[in-house]
Amino acid sequence: MKLSTFKNHLNQSQELTFTLPNGEPIPSHFHITEVGLITKDFIDCGGTVRSTKIISFQVWVANDIEHRLEPQKLLKIISSADYLFENEEYEIEVEYDSLLSAENQHLLSKSGTWQTIGRYGIELYNDHFIFTTKQTDCLAKDQCGVPPEKIKVKLSEIVAAPTQACTPGGNCC
């Protein structure tokens, strides 16, 4: 989601809610502890120099359960950082504490619950924001020897055009 879309929704909202990709709501007493522009300059595995920019929100849940961030307050926080965004329309990414999967429970921190920061996209659904999963990808598949993904087609759905149909004696078979 682009920042302008996010801000437009905040302007029309009375309440601010976030939900994880699995449907679990972020506790309503969350804080937005950072709003910033992240620039990533890198070289992909094919040797191409690249640069990306995203707007990052850090969402944090403390134990002050009476805290509630209102949409208008978040708009003020974002507005104070607008000069960082260079009047560009960047995508928003959200940082949020993530739980480990069951198979990685042996990596738990001393507190026994949180282990790492998850990075999520964000979308609007039924008047509230949902964190979306992000995926890694190779940006130089053609140079790394990664074969292109084959398109799966059902043979029953292929209809040959009349000019391409084989006929007896047509030398197409």
Image (tube, rainbow, N blue to C red):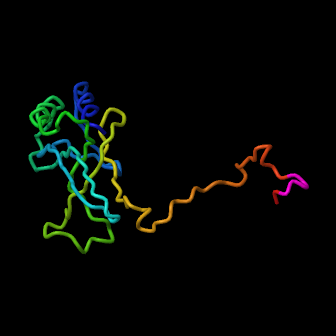
The quadrant in which the C terminus is found is: bottom right
Residue at 11% in and 31% down: 76
**Magenta-drawn stretch contains 88:** no
In the image: residue 109, left or right of residue 8: left
Q: Quadrant of residue 111?
A: bottom left
The one nearer the camera, 146 or 61, is 146
In the image: residue 58, left or right of residue 153: left
In the image: residue 80, left or right of residue 160: left
The correct choice, above or below, for 122 with respect to 145 in the image is above
The one nearer the camera, 172 or 67, is 172
Relative image position of residue 48 (x, y in whole percent): 31, 59
Specify the farthest residue to the bottom: 106
The quadrant in which the N terminus is found is: top left
Magenta segment: 167-171
Residue at 70% in and 49% down: 157
Relative image position of residue 169 (x, y in whole percent): 90, 55
Specify the farthest residue to the top: 12
Residue at 15% in and 49% down: 61
Relative image position of residue 90 (x, y in whole percent): 25, 40
- The mark tally for this picture is 0
Relative image position of residue 113 (x, y in whole percent): 20, 64
The one nearer the camera, 155 or 162, is 162
Q: Quadrant of residue 152?
A: bottom right
**Would you say the magenta stretch is mainly helix, strand or loop?**
loop
Q: Quadrant of residue 102?
A: bottom left
The correct choice, above or below, for 34 with respect to 89 in the image is below
